[in-house]
Image (spheres, rainbow, N blue to C red):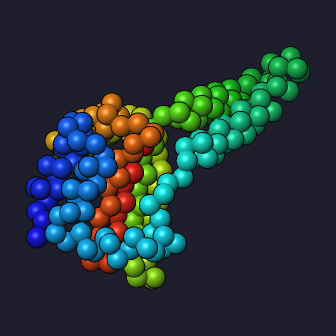
C-alpha cells in the first residue's frame, strides 16, 4: 500500500523540477492502490480530466466588468450633463460601480494568460452534487495572503508558498495534475 509520504515525495520532486510531470504521473500510477484510478480512466464522460481552457474562463469576469462599467457610467453620466448641485449623489454612487467594472476588466485581461487552479470533486453517489472551482492562481495567492493573518492555522500550513512554487515551475504546456479517488469521491486538482 502506498503511503502518503511516498506520494508527497513524488509531488515534491515534480515541484522542484527534478522530474517531469509525465514521469511523476507514471510514478504515482505505479504505486500500489492506483487501481482505483484505473477503473475511471475509460469513463471520460463522468470523470473528465481535460480542463476548460483559460481562454473561456476569463470571458465571464470580462463581461461582468463591462456591464458594471456601463451601469456605473449610466448612473453618473446624467449627473455630469445636468450641472445641478443635487446631482452629486449620483456621481458618488456611479463612480465606485464604474471603477469596480474597470478593475474587473483589467483582472480578467490579466487572468487570460495566467495560470489557473482547477479543483473538481466528483461523487460516485448521485445524491451528492459535484463541486467544480476554477480560479486564477494569482488570485488564490492574493486571497491566501489576505486571509492568512486572520486565520492562524492557515498561515502555519505554508499553502501560499506552495502556490508560489507552483506558479514559478508550471506552464500551460505541462500542467500539474493530481487525481485521487477514495471512498466514492474523486478529487482532481489541475494547475496550468
Q: Residue at x 55, y 47 (%)?
A: 53
Image coordinates of residue 179 in percent, x first then y, are: 32, 61
Quarter location, residue 95:
top right
Q: Nearer the viewer, residue 113 or 38?
A: 38
Q: Is residue 91 above or below residue 45?
A: above
Q: Can you see residue 152? A: no
**Point 55% across, 43% down: residue:** 54
- Residue drawn at x 73%, y 25% is 91
What is the quadrant of residue 33 in the picture? bottom left
Q: Nearer the viewer, residue 141 or 44?
A: 44
Residue lying at the far right in this picture: please name it. 82
The residue drawn where x is 31% and y is 70% is 37
Q: Position of residue 88 (x, y in %)?
A: 74, 23
Q: Quadrant of the N terminus?
A: bottom left
Q: Nearer the viewer, residue 26 or 124?
A: 26
> Residue 120 location, x and y as percent?
42, 61
Q: Is residue 121 left or right of residue 27?
A: right
66 relative to 160 in the view: left or right: right
Quadrant placement of the C terminus: top left
Number of disc labels = 0
Is residue 46 shown to the viewer in this render?
yes
Query: Does residue 81 sit above or below 90 in this rendering?
Result: above
Pick the front one: 37 or 57: 37
Measuring from the top left, give residue 68's x and y in whole percent.
69, 37
Amino acid at each position: 500500500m502506498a503511503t502518503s509520504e511516498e506520494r508527497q515525495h513524488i509531488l515534491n520532486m515534480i515541484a522542484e523540477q527534478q522530474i517531469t510531470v509525465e514521469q511523476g504521473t507514471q510514478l504515482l500510477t505505479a504505486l500500489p492502490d492506483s487501481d482505483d484510478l484505473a477503473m475511471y480512466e475509460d469513463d471520460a464522460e463522468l470523470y473528465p480530466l481535460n480542463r476548460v481552457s483559460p481562454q473561456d474562463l476569463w470571458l465571464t469576469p470580462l463581461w461582468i466588468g463591462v456591464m458594471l462599467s456601463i451601469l456605473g457610467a449610466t448612473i453618473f453620466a446624467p449627473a455630469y450633463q445636468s450641472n445641478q448641485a443635487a446631482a452629486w449623489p449620483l456621481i458618488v454612487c456611479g463612480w465606485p460601480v464604474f471603477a469596480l467594472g474597470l478593475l474587473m476588466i483589467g483582472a480578467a485581461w490579466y487572468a487570460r494568460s495566467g495560470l489557473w487552479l482547477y479543483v473538481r470533486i466528483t461523487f460516485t453517489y448521485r445524491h451528492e452534487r459535484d463541486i467544480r472551482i476554477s480560479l486564477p492562481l494569482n488570485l488564490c495567492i492574493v486571497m491566501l495572503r489576505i486571509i492568512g493573518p486572520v486565520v492562524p492555522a492557515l498561515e502555519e500550513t505554508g499553502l501560499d508558498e506552495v502556490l508560489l512554487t507552483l506558479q514559478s515551475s508550471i506552464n500551460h504546456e505541462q500542467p500539474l495534475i493530481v487525481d485521487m479517488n477514495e471512498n466514492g469521491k474523486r478529487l482532481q486538482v489541475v494547475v496550468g
